[in-house]
Amino acid sequence: MSVLAHLPALVVIAPLLTSPLVLLLKPRGLAWLAALVASLASFAIAIALTTSVLEGTTPGYEMGGWPAPYGIGLTIDALSAIVLLVVTGASSFALLAGRASIDSQIAPARQPYFYAAWLLAVAGFLGIAVSADAFNIFVFMEISSLACYVLIAGGPDRRALPAVFKYLIIGTVAATFYLIGVGLIYMMTGTLALADMESRIEAVADQSPILVAAGFITIGLALKAAVFPLHVWLPNAYTHAPHIVTVFLAACATKVAIYVLLRFDFFVFQQNLIGHELQFSFFLLPLAVLAVLIASGAALAESNLKRLLAYSSIAQIGYILLGASLVSVEGLTAGIVHLFNHALAKGALFLAVAGLALGASGLDLEDLRGIARKRPWTMAAFVAASLSLIGMPGTAGFISKWYLITAAIEQGPLGMVLVTVIVVSSLMALAYIWRVVEPAYFQSSETSSSAGEPAASTRGGAISWLAAVTWIAVAANFYFGLQPALPLSLAANAAGLLLGHMP
Amino acid sequence: MITVFGIFLLSLLVITALAIVQTRNLFVAVMLAAIFSLLMAANFFILDAADVALTEAAVGAGVTTVILLSALALTAEREKRSGSIRWISVAVVAVTVLILIYATFDKPALGDPDAPVHQHVAPWYLEKTPVFMDIPNVVTAVLASFRGYDTLGEVFVVFVAMVGVLFVLGGDGGRSGPITTPDPGLRHHLIPKVVGRLLLPFIILFGLYVQFHGEYGPGGGFQAGAIIATGLILHALLEGEQAALRSVPAGAMQALVVAGASLYGGVGVACMLLGGSFLDYSVLHPDPVTGRQIGIIAIELGVGMAVCGALLSIFHAFAAREH
Amino acid sequence: MEILGYFNYWVFAIVLMIGLYAVIARGNLIKKLLGLSIFQSAVFLMYITMDKVEGGTAPIIQPGAVDQLYSNPLPQVLILTAIVVGVSTTALGLAIVVRIREAYGSIEEADILEEDIYDPEDQKEDPIP
C-alpha cells in the first residue's frame, strides 16, 4: 500500500503515538516542539485528505485489514474533512502561538504531561471525525474527553478544579448516554458500523428500543455539544482553563460533538424513523433560538472577558444548530460553514485574549482599562476578529450569517422570525464586544502600569510572536470572508451528503 | 437453578447499590462498592462472560477500591448531611428510567438465540476465528485483531488517565514538605504481613499465566496488567510506600507504560511498513495465521505492560500525596 | 420464563436510576463518583445481558465439540473496553477531588460554592512565576 492510502489512519496515529514519547522529553521546550511537529503533521495530512475529498473521492481505510462491519472502518467525506481541518488547524495555531502563555501558566515539571494530554485530545477528536463505527467513536470520545479534563485542570486558578469536576461528571454521563443508545441499536441490529446500521435499522425502526436509542444518543451528544440548556459545564470550564487550552477547546471541542450528532441523526436515523425529521426540527429549533438569545443576553451581563466569550460560544452553537434544524440544503450548508467560520473567529479571539492576559493583571473587564495602549497590536487583533464574530461584510462570519438568513427566508413566515432573531443577536454581539472595547480604548488604567508588566523586557519577543500568530488567524478570517470557496464547497458537499440520507 | 441464582445475585446488586447511596460513611460506601463489583463479576460469569468477569473482579473490586481508599485518606470519611431531597433530580431520574423500562418490552428476551445480536456479525467471528487465527478464545481474537483499533484506543484511555493523575497530583505541590516519619506500611500487623508475603508470588504468577494464556482461556493483557498491579500494590501496602518505590521506582513504572503503548503502536506501524494496513498482523510472518498469532501475543504484552504501569503510577501518585 | 427474560433489563434500569440519582442529587464529590461508577456498571450489565445465548457457553472454542452453542463475544469485548474507561474516569475524578479538598478544605459541593462566592481575594489570577 502506498503512503497515500494510509493517510486516513495516519492523521490519527501521528498525534496518538507521539504522546507517550512526549513524556520522555524532559528538557524544556522539546515536549512543546514534539507536540507542535505532530500537530502540524496531522494538519498537513488533513489538508491532503481534504484535497482528495474536493476531487470527489471518499478516502476510506480498513483497520487491521478487516472489512466493516467485522472490523473497524474509517471514512472521510466532506463533513469529516471540515472537522479535520478545524481540529488540526486550531491545535497547530494554538501550539505555535502559545509557548509563552503556557510557560506562564504551567510549571515546567508538569509540561510534558500537559503536552501529552494535548496530543491525546487532538488524536481523540480526529479519531471521532474519521471513524465509521459507533463504538469506536465512543472510545475516541473518551480519550478526547479525559484529555480535555486534564488540560482544563491545568488552570492556575483553584476554581478550575470544581469547573473541571463538573465537566467530568456531565461529560461521563453524556458519554454513557451515548453508550446506552449505541447498545440499544446494537441489540436490535447486531452491528456497530454506521453504514451497516443504516441499512439494518429499517426492519426494526418502529420498535421502542430504537426510538429510545435515538433519544439517548441525541441527549448525550447535546450535553457534550453544550446545546442550551445543557450547557452548564461550559462557561466555567472555558473561563478557568489555561488561556491556550481555551483557544483550542473553543475552536473545536463542541464542534466535534455536533459533528457526531449530525452524522448519527442524518446517516442512521433520518431515513428510517418515521417523522424523525420533524422531531429533530421541533427539538432543536426552539433550543437553538433560545440559545442564541439567552446566551447573548448572558454575555451582555458578564464581567469576565473569557466567560463573556464562552457565553458567546453557546450562542454560536445555537446558530449552527439553527441552520441544521431547518433540514434543508441551504440550512445545513449555513450550519456547517458556521462550524468552520466560528472556529476561526473564536480561535483568533481567544488567541488575542491569551496575548492580553500576558499584559493585564486579570481578565475582568475592569482590569482591561487602557490595555489598548499597552498592547496595541493584540487589542487591534481582538477588534478585527470580533468583526468576524459579529458578522461584518468581508469577514468569514458574514458568509455564514448570509447563508443562514438566506436559508431562513426560504422557510416562509417562520423564516422572518428567525431572520429577526439572527439580526437581533448580531446587534447583541456588537453590544457585548463594545463592552470590552470601551474600557480597553477609552478608559485609562488607574493602577500603576508596572503592576501588570512582569519582566516585560524578557517577554517582549514572546508577546510580539503571540500577537503575530494572532494576526495570521485574523487574516484567515478575512481571507475566508473574501474567498469562501473552500469551506462553502465542503459544506455544500456535506449538506448534500447528509440530505442524501433522507427518504 | 442458575436462573434462581441469577435473580438472587441481581437482587443483592440492587440492595448493595441502594446501600452505597444511603450510607453517610464513605468508608462503608467504598467497601460496599467493592462488594457491588464482585456481585457484578459473578453476574457476568453466569452470563457466560468469563473475560469480563475476571476484569471486573480485578479492576472494579481490586484496583478501584484501593485508589478510592487512598483518596479517602486524603479527603474525608464522612459525608455531610445535605438538605431536603431535590425533587427535580428525582423527576429527571424517574423519567429516564421509565423510558428505559418502556424500551425493554420490544427487546429480545434473555438468552433468545434468534435475537438480532446473535445473527449478523457474531456468528462470523465464531466461525472465522479458527480459520484466521487458530486460537480458541474468540474474545481475545476480536479484542486484539478484529477490533484491535478499539483496544489501542483503550490503552490510550488508561494512558491519559495516568497522565492526568500525575499532572493533577504531581508537580511539587504534594512533595514540598520533607518526609519525616518513614512509612511503616502494615509491617506491624503480623497476620496480613505473613499472608500477604505468601500470596504475593502466587498473585504475580497468576498474572503472568493470565497474560500468556489469554489466547486459550479467559484472560489477556488487561486482566494480567490489573492482577500484577494489584499484587505490587499489596506489596506497597505491606512494606510501605518507600520500600515499594525502591523495588519499582516511579520512573520505571512510567517507562513501562510508554514502552507498552509504543509496543502496541509499533506493531501497528510495522504492519504498515510491511505492506499491510495498520494493525494487520498477517504480514508479520510468511504464514498469515502465524503472523496474526505473533501480532496478538505482542499487542497483548503491550496492553499488559501499559495497564500494569499505569495503575501502579496512579496508585503511587495518590499514596505519595499522603506525606 | 417470559418475565425472567426481561428481569436483567429491569435491574439494569433500576441500578442505572440509583447511580444517576447519586450523581445528580448528592453533594459529596466522592459520592458522586461512586454514583457515576454504579451508573456505568448498569450499562455493562445491559451489554452483557444481550450476549447470553440459552444453552450456550463462554466463547472459547472447544476442539472437537460439535454443535456447541457459544455466547456472543462482541459485547464482551466492548465491555472490557468500557470497564477500563470507567476506572480511568474514576481515577482522574478522584485526583481532582483530592486537589479540591486541598484548595477548598471540603469535598461538599455546597461548601465549595460558598467559598468561591465569599472569597473576593481569589478573583485575581495567580500566574506561576
Image: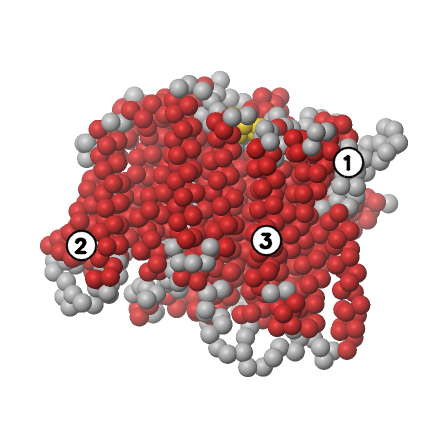
Of circles 2 and 3, which is in front? 3
Q: Is residue A153 above or below residue A58?
A: below
Q: Residue B257 carries which label?
A: 3
Residue hosting label 1: B135
Q: Mark 2: few, some, or many residues within 10 Å (few <14, many ≥20)? A: some
Q: In this view, does B242 lie above or below B142?
A: below
Q: Position of residue B231 (x, y in %)?
A: 71, 62
Tell me the distance, in whole angstroms, between the alpha carbons under discs 2 and 1: 66 Å
Q: Where is residue A301 in the image (x, y as percent from the top left)?
A: 25, 52
Which residue is located at x 18 percent, y 54 percent?
A375
Chain letter for mark 1, please: B
Apparent side of residue A162 relative to residue B114 in the rendered image (left or right): left
Apparent side of residue A487 relative to residue C51 in the rendered image (left or right): left
Q: Name the foreground residue: B277 vs A359.
A: B277
Which residue is located at x 63 percent, y 70 percent?
B246
Residue hosting label 2: A375
Q: Is mark 3 on a helix, strand or loop?
A: helix
Q: Do the residues labelled 3 and 1 touch (CB within 8 Å)?
A: no
Q: In the picture, residue A81 is in which quadrant?
A: top left
